[in-house]
């Protein structure tokens, strides 16, 4: 099954907690603190793989969580950092923020991309030893890793997009010029997924993508709708196949205009791509006059026309030679620029805060305070004293007293609530 859109949740690993430990050694009295730092949490890394061509794996697994860093140990030993979680996707996959739809990264090459960073490890108690606090019995916990929902969207990377109505011979053409083996049958919508073929006989060679499902109204959702139009967006040029045999009673001029109109309605950029028109099934033409009218109409619009028979392998060489030569002069495959900007982490140096009284509770708010609370062990006397000094030195106690706080009045900071004791 071909899947080209998937929504998943990723979470980088949490950093390991710092250790609380003290040096223990024979004949050494009053050994100092030697609790080690926690290890870094694992990153979430995406890497494009040329051997993949579908997002099928993400249909069944939608949560990806990296390992946490190891906690610090004694003797100043730092905990082990967690390995990154590497997620492989097809080349050409777009990573988007699921909430905003903004592009985070276009994986158009095989360079790894860190989508979510693991949390830093917490400090061990060795960092909190001072001349007046020689036995710190607290440490810092590890920081959480980044987590969010993302949407993966595959836009195939191909040099040439093969477009046209169903049953005009696109699959037959692809099988004739490359080693691709698409399904071929005499009914509409035989091809239900994009097929890629490599032509390696002209210039540096090129990749052709057979784009299925483009019919009248496709840009508005008819047929296979816009499901596969996205795969044309990377193409550097188009081969527009038209059935000129008249075997199905269709007007080739009308078909040609309808397809170009759908391209323009879906994306004006696609409509401006260089386009070679391929008049297919010329070996079984019923109405020679209709064929000539079609060629005259297309050439009047400035498009080169190549008459071929994909089934009989006729007229392919001039077309492929022209395609290869044209590609040499065109820009490289389109790479989409990122649009998403991560929300910057709040500056911990900003010690601003607010104190308000709500329903008899004194509420203290400040993002930096929430981070401080994560480091406090409320069952440890020295850690509590450390917390008290922070409130005092940053003016929070003074502000509470200005608002008239009294002994045993409730105070709330984040999720923490306690009684005030002067």
Image (tube, rainbow, N blue to C red):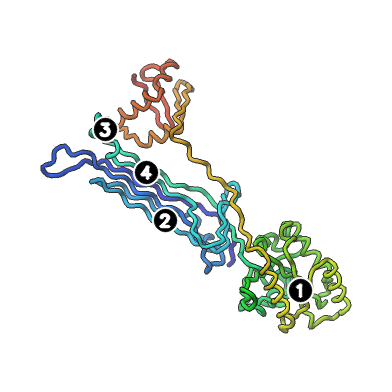
Q: Give the quadrant of the N terminus.
A: bottom right
Rendered position, 388 above or below 190 = above
10 Å crowding of disc 1: few (<14), some (14-19), many (20+):
many
- Give the label, 1 or 3, closer to the camera: 3
Which residue is nearer to you in this view: 422 or 205?
205
Mark 2 to mark 4: distance in Å? 17 Å
**Viewport quadrant of the C terminus:** top left
- Judge from the rendering whether residue 372 lies leftward or rightward of residue 234; answer left or right: left
Q: Residue 278 bears which disc, if any?
A: 1
The disc at residue 256 is: none
- Give the mark nearer the N terminus: 3 vs 4: 3
On the image, numbered disc 2 is attached to which residue?
84
In this view, the residue farthest toward the left is 27
Residue 137 percent coordinates (x, y): 26, 36
User: Image point 49% across, 62% down: which residue?
Assistant: 88
Looking at the image, do the residues carrying marks 4 and 1 touch, with CB atoms under 8 Å apart?
Answer: no
For this rendering, which residue is in front, 115 or 54? Answer: 115
- Residue 313 lies left or right of residue 102; in this view the side is right
Helix, strand or loop under label 4: loop
């Amino acid at each position: 099954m071909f899947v080209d859109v998937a929504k998943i949740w990723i979470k980088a690993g949490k950093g390991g907690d710092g250790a609380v430990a003290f040096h223990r050694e024979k004949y050494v009295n009053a050994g100092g603190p030697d609790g080690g730092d926690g290890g870094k949490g694992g990153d979430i890394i995406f890497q494009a793989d040329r051997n993949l061509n579908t997002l099928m794996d993400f249909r069944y697994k939608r949560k990806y969580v990296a390992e946490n860093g190891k906690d610090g140990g004694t003797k100043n030993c730092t905990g082990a950092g967690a390995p990154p979680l590497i997620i492989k996707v097809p080349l050409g996959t777009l990573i988007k923020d699921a909430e905003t739809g903004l592009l985070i990264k276009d994986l158009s090459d095989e360079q790894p991309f860190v989508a979510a960073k693991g949390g830093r490890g917490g400090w061990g108690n060795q960092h909190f030893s001072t001349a007046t606090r020689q036995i710190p019995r607290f440490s810092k916990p590890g920081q959480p890793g980044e987590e969010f929902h993302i949407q993966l969207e595959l836009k195939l990377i191909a040099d040439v997009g093969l477009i046209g109505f169903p049953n005009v011979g696109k699959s037959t053409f692809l099988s004739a010029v490359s080693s691709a083996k698409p399904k071929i049958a005499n009914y509409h919508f035989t091809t239900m997924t994009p097929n890629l073929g490599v032509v390696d006989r002209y210039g540096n060679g090129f990749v052709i993508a057979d784009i299925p499902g483009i019919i009248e109204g496709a840009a508005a959702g008819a047929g296979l709708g816009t499901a596969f139009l996205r795969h044309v967006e990377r193409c550097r040029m188009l081969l527009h196949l038209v059935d000129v045999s008249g075997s199905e009673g269709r007007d080739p001029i009308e078909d040609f205009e309808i397809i170009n109109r759908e391209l323009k309605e879906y994306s004006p950029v696609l409509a401006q791509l260089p386009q070679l028109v391929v008049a297919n099934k010329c070996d079984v033409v019923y109405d020679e006059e209709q064929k000539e009218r079609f060629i005259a109409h297309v050439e009047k619009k400035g498009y080169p026309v190549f008459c071929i028979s994909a089934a009989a392998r006729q007229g392919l060489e001039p077309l492929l030679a022209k395609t290869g030569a044209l590609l040499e002069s065109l820009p490289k495959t389109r790479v989409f620029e990122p649009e998403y900007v991560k929300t910057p982490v709040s500056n911990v140096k900003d010690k601003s805060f607010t104190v308000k009284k709500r329903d008899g509770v004194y509420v203290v708010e400040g993002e930096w305070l929430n981070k401080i609370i994560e480091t406090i062990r409320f069952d440890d006397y020295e850690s509590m004293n450390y917390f008290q000094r922070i409130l005092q030195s940053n003016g929070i106690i003074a502000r509470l007293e200005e608002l008239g706080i009294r002994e045993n009045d409730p105070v709330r900071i984040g999720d923490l609530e306690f009684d005030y004791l002067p």
